[in-house]
Amino acid sequence: MAYPFQLGFQDATSPIMEELLHFHDHTLMIVFLISSLVLYIISLMLTTKLTHTSTMDAQEVETIWTILPAIILILIALPSLRILYMMDEINSPSLTVKTMGHQWYWSYEYTDSEDLSFDSYMIPTQELKPGELRLLEVDNRVVLPMEVTIRVLISSEDVLHSWAVPSLGLKTDAIPGRLNQTTLMGTRPGLYYGQCSEICGSNHSFMPIVLELVPLAYFEKWSASML
Ligand SMILES: [Cu+2]
């Protein structure tokens, strides 16, 4: 989860989020290099009265400053498209969870089980136990097996919501009348926090998402105990 005054991303918990972090660092490095060059040129222009007459009209220079930015844009676009298609890939999921957005809570359905579904409400601040996180804790966590490909179907019963878990690189809109799907593959056990990411009404800030990623054997025990 995020910590106070955090500047960067949360640690990655899925291979997709690792790819996204790499892409972010790659792009930021390009931005950093361009900004330094521009800053250097500005400082040169401000501190000298010399003028290079050859740069006033030179076909070669114009060719370079047209082609170079084009190459840089391609260097950003190609890895970006690669990740975009990877995120879109649904590779034979072993489990499906349907999540519905409501004003203002989430409900979950494990469609592989006959009757495994529950609502997930935020725990109000006055009912928190010591050590629990304000505005992030829920009464029923989404327990999911780690190292298993999971399909998440996302929709809404009333208004637009968005199901988002930053450390898994997930953010999918919950739209009434439309079923969106995304895949999830956690690489380590733990609790992963998210929040609704679509301004959905007065209690928009109070419908968090808590994923509990556990080993498969524990998940089987949990799902049996829930039936
Ligand atoms: Cu919402």
Image (cartoon, grey):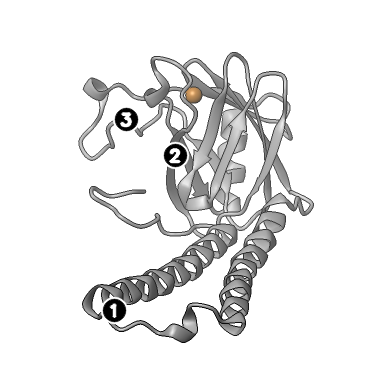
Mark 2: C-beta under 8 Å from nearest atom of ligand 1: no
Between discs 2 and 3, the one toward the N terminus: 3
Give the labeled residue for mark 1. Answer: 44
Q: Quadrant of residue 126?
A: top left
Label 1 or label 2, whichever comes before in sequence order: 1
| Tag shown at residue 135 | 3
Q: Is residue 66 above or below residue 58?
A: above
Nearest to the observer: residue 7 or residue 190:
7
Quadrant housing residue 40? bottom left
Residue type at mark 3 is Leu
From this viewpoint, which residue is outermost toward the right? 92
The residue shown at (49%, 43%) is 165
Res. 194 mark: 2
- Which label sits in the foreground, 1 or 3? 1
- Give the number of the disc on residue 64: none
Give the image location of residue 72, x and y in percent. 58, 71
| Quadrant position of the C terminus in the picture | top right
Asked if the beta carbon under badge 1 is closer than 8 A to the nearest atom of ligand 1, the reply is no
Mark 2 and mark 3: Cα distance apart in space: 10 Å
Question: Do the residues under discs 1 and 2 have CB atoms within 8 angstroms?
Answer: no
